[in-house]
């Protein structure tokens, strides 16, 4: 094994659909699609559903077609996907020196100095499949961008490659670069693809050979790095954990249109509860809150209205009671009767770390008691489940909750919904 | 069942000391130095491992093995199935809990209740082993 960095990208195949199949062996050969929040549109398809269903197709339009073709649809079950994701990542972590969990269904691994990376890739694939039932593809290369391409190839040529492709050797790398459209390269979006097209850059190989300095001058340092990575020079390391976010947002469509202020206030209080949990999880305080509501925007026959307002808080805070009060007051000020509202959004702005903001001598700061109350709240909800302890304006089972009519059981995260095994 | 647990199953609160005793007022317990280790049921059952799952049993065909209706089964997906193991098998895509019997080239799923005959796996049957039942938990209240 030669020196230098080696990365693997492990990517779950049709992750959400695969999760739905783990506890439904009867669906092993039945095409499966998963729907977005509110059962709106298709967000995931099993391999065998892809020829029949496009990403993003609205469910109500294809309901009959799915039934005719025998394709099974599920509401998104994030409790299940989150738990299965954690299992997949734990198996990967047990097999390699360092891992960066890149998304719910992808992880980069650092294989520098590991003898026989391709054999290790197959081992990862086998053990993840065996431990979780989730099939994964593994791409191995000298840089993260190349590992992503190798992974793409592993999926495209599943039968020939067994789901594992190692392109550390130059002739393999060159073959993949020549046979991949530049649009498939990590970080090349539709607009960049159009620009590159004008410059005569069609394949990944063309981009690898393009002059990095020209790319930097014309576009950005990001695409320059991409080109260097394709040419084999590693510019991206395994990431350290994300820095704390500068703003936190929680926004959702209601399960049905809402016309009355009390129900909208409930929704806003509920979104604020979630947003403030995220705020405390990253140990930040927030100085401003923005709340907005809107009607549906696509139906021209309906009266349309959208409005939002920013509120200053009395002091930098992570106290859900203060935040909820501010948010419900705010929504009251933008609410206009007579409209059918479809969505609300809560944003926490001007985030700071405790101690980072300059306190002038007379400015109020969050009382110490509030900080204690919040830590007890978080401890209770982490032990007994989200929403166990909540501010009174958040209902247990709201009438405006998301529609998830096709939800599978939470097989791995609720004792009352475990998989049933028959003894008969 | 009336109680529900949200989120991934997390580690239980307190570890139990291996021997418990009342602490006498005044004198320190002479046994305090003799507690050998702390026990966690999570560890005993290994339910924290990514390849271990909980399932609920329904039916009476495994009574002879001490597995009853409503029991909680701890299922390990990573172990190699061998003759004599109690397995969660997918028989023609239906999950069943049986004892695996390998006799020469024959594969048989055995029940542990005389009411249920052995199920011989025939040509045309589809059989996959989903996991191995490593323990079961029964509530007596």
Image (tube, grey):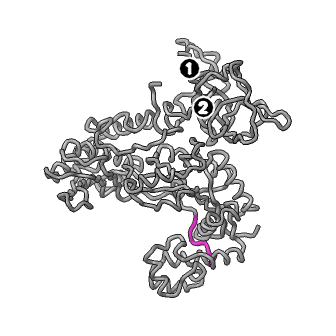
Chain under callout 1: B
Does residue A100 appear in this view? no
**Position in image of residue A372 (x %, y %):** 35, 37
Q: Position of residue B31 (x, y in %)?
A: 64, 17
Please state the chain letter of the residue tagged with numbered disc 2 in the rendered image: A
Q: Which residues are magenta?
A: A231-237
Question: How far is disc 1 from disc 2 in space, using C-alphas?
Answer: 17 Å
**Disc 1 marks which residue?**
B139
Q: Quadrant of residue A325?
A: top left
Quadrant housing the N terminus of chain A: bottom right
Give the quarter of the figure containing the C terminus of chain A. top right
Camera-side residue of A34 and B91: B91
Give the residue at mark 2.
A421
Q: Position of residue B68 (x, y in %)?
A: 62, 21
Residue A184, above or below A250: below
Q: Circle 1 sits in a helix, a strand or a loop, which is it?
A: loop
């Amino acid at each position: 094994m030669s020196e230098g960095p080696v990365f693997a990208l492990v990517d779950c195949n049709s992750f959400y659909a695969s999760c739905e199949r783990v506890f439904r062996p009867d669906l092993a050969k039945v095409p499966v699609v998963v729907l977005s929040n509110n059962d709106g549109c298709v967000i995931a398809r099993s391999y065998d559903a892809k020829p029949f269903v496009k990403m993003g197709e609205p469910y109500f339009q294809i309901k009959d077609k799915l039934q005719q073709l025998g394709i099974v649809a599920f509401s998104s079950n994030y409790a299940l996907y989150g738990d299965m994701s954690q299992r997949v990542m734990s198996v990967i972590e047990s097999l390699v020196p360092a891992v960066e969990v890149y998304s719910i269904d992808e992880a980069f691994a650092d294989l520098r100095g590991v003898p026989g990376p391709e054999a290790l890739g197959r081992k990862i694939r086998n053990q993840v499949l065996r431990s979780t039932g989730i099939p994964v593809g593994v791409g191995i290369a000298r840089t993260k961008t190349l590992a992503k391409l190798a992974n793409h190839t592993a999926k495209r040529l599943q039968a020939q490659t067994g789901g594992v492709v190692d392109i550390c050797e130059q002739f393999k790398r060159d073959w993949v670069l020549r046979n991949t459209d530049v649009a498939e390269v990590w970080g090349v979006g539709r607009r960049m693809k159009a620009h590159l097209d004008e410059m005569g850059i069609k394949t990944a190989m063309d981009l690898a050979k393009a002059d990095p300095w020209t790319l930097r001058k014309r576009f950005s340092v990001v695409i320059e790095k991409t080109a260097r990575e394709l040419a084999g020079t590693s510019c991206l390391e395994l990431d350290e954990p994300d820095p704390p976010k500068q703003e936190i947002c929680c926004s959702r469509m209601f399960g049905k249109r809402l016309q009355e202020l009390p129900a909208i206030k409930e929704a806003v209080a509920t979104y604020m509860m979630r947003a403030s949990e995220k705020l405390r999880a990253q140990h930040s305080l927030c100085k401003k809150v923005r709340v907005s509501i809107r009607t549906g925007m696509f139906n021209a026959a309906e009266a349309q209205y959208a409005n939002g307002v920013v509120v200053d808080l009395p002091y930098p805070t992570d106290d859900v009671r203060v935040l909820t009060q501010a948010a419900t007051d705010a929504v009251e000020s933008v609410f206009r009767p007579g409209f059918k509202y479809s969505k609300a959004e809560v944003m926490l702005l001007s985030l700071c770390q405790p101690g980072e903001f300059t306190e002038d001598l007379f400015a109020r700061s969050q009382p110490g008691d509030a900080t204690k109350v919040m830590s007890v709240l978080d401890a209770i909800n982490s032990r007994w489940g989200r929403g166990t302890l909540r501010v009174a304006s958040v209902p247990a089972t709201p009438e405006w909750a998301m529609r998830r009519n096709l939800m599978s059981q939470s097989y791995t995260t609720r004792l009352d919904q475990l998989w049933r095994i028959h003894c008969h | 069942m009336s109680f529900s647990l949200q989120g991934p199953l997390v580690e239980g609160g307190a570890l139990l000391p291996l021997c418990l005793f009342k602490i006498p007022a005044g004198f320190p317990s002479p046994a305090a130095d003799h507690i050998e280790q702390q026990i966690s049921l999570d560890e005993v059952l290994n339910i924290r491992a990514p390849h271990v799952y909980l399932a609920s049993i329904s039916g009476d065909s495994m009574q002879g093995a001490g597995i009853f209706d409503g029991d909680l089964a701890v299922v390990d997906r990573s172990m190699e199935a061998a003759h004599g193991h109690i397995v969660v098998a997918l028989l023609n895509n239906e999950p069943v809990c049986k004892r695996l019997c390998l006799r020469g080239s024959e594969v048989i799923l055995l029940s542990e209740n005389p009411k249920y005959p052995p199920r011989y796996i025939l040509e045309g049957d589809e059989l996959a082993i989903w996991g191995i039942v490593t323990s079961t938990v029964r509530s007596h209240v």
